[in-house]
Amino acid sequence: MEVTVSNVLQFKIELLDVDPPIWRRIQVPSDYSFWDLHVAIQDSMGWKDSHLHAFQVPGPLGNQMEIGLPDPYGEMDVIPGWERKLGTFFKSPGDKLDYEYDFGDSWCHSVLLEEVTLKSPGASYPSCTAGQGQCPPEDCGGPPGFEMFLEAVADPTHESHAELLAWCGGEFDPLGFTPESVVFDDPQKRLKSLNE
């Protein structure tokens, strides 16, 4: 199916290098930009969007380009996500790229286009239709830190158990996710708040 503005793109977003698995299935309008997709990923995963991010996209000469939030220090060459539509890369099911959030903790995600469908009458997009696993807490140290965090909160005798539970709000269920709990923000409002 050729992608048109009346289409919906269905993605599977999988957080890499974590156990148990953490993933989301989201549907977004085909006219979305990479910035819009970033906001949908943040909201569906449960991240707070408080760090830099980038999509790794193959360039025209076989090189790797980064599309995301420009580096405020100018140390990285990043194409602003709001300047590129998803259709510049995602053309058919099976197209896949990497998305990294928080370059310190290095949360790497696989972004796979699973399906291109027509918009359903009366449906609103973006939407989260499936998923598994609760998102790691921000700033917990990436996949290795998250593994240690899970061990500590699961073991009441662990020396950091009470401290880490208090730090993450009092409880953490690694399997605690339901698609119905996802609330999507307006990507244009989020973009405007960056410039305020």
Image: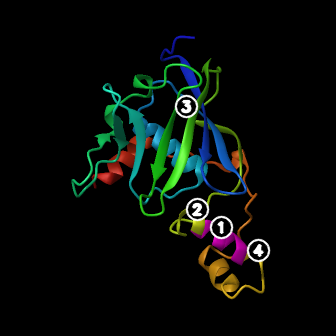
Q: Tell me: 150 left or right of 98.
A: right
Picture coordinates of residue 60, whole percent (x, y): 32, 25
Q: Which residue is mark 2?
A: 143
Residue 79 in magenta stretch:
no
Whether 175 is drawn above or below 161: the answer is above
Q: Work out whether residue 125 can be spotted.
A: no
Query: CB atoms at circles 1 and 2 under 8 Å apart?
Result: yes
Mark 4 or mark 3, whichever is nearer to me: 4
Q: Which residue is mark 1?
A: 147
Q: CA distance from mark 4 to mark 3?
A: 35 Å
Regarding mark 1 in the picture, which secondary structure is present there?
helix
Image-quadrant location for residue 78:
top left
Mark number for residue 28? 3
Sequence-first tag of 4 and 3: 3
Q: Tell me: 121 left or right of 176.
A: left
The residue sitting at 55% across, 49% down in the picture is 43
Q: Quadrant of the C terminus?
A: bottom left
Whether 182 is drawn above or below 105: the answer is above
Q: CA distance from mark 1 to mark 3?
A: 31 Å
Regarding mark 3 in the picture, which secondary structure is present there?
strand
Picture coordinates of residue 178, whole percent (x, y): 73, 49
Span colored in magenta: 145-152
Query: CB atoms at circles 3 and 2 under 8 Å apart?
Result: no
Identify which amino acid the numbered label 4 is placed on.
Ala
Q: Which residue is nearer to you in this view: 22 or 62?
A: 62
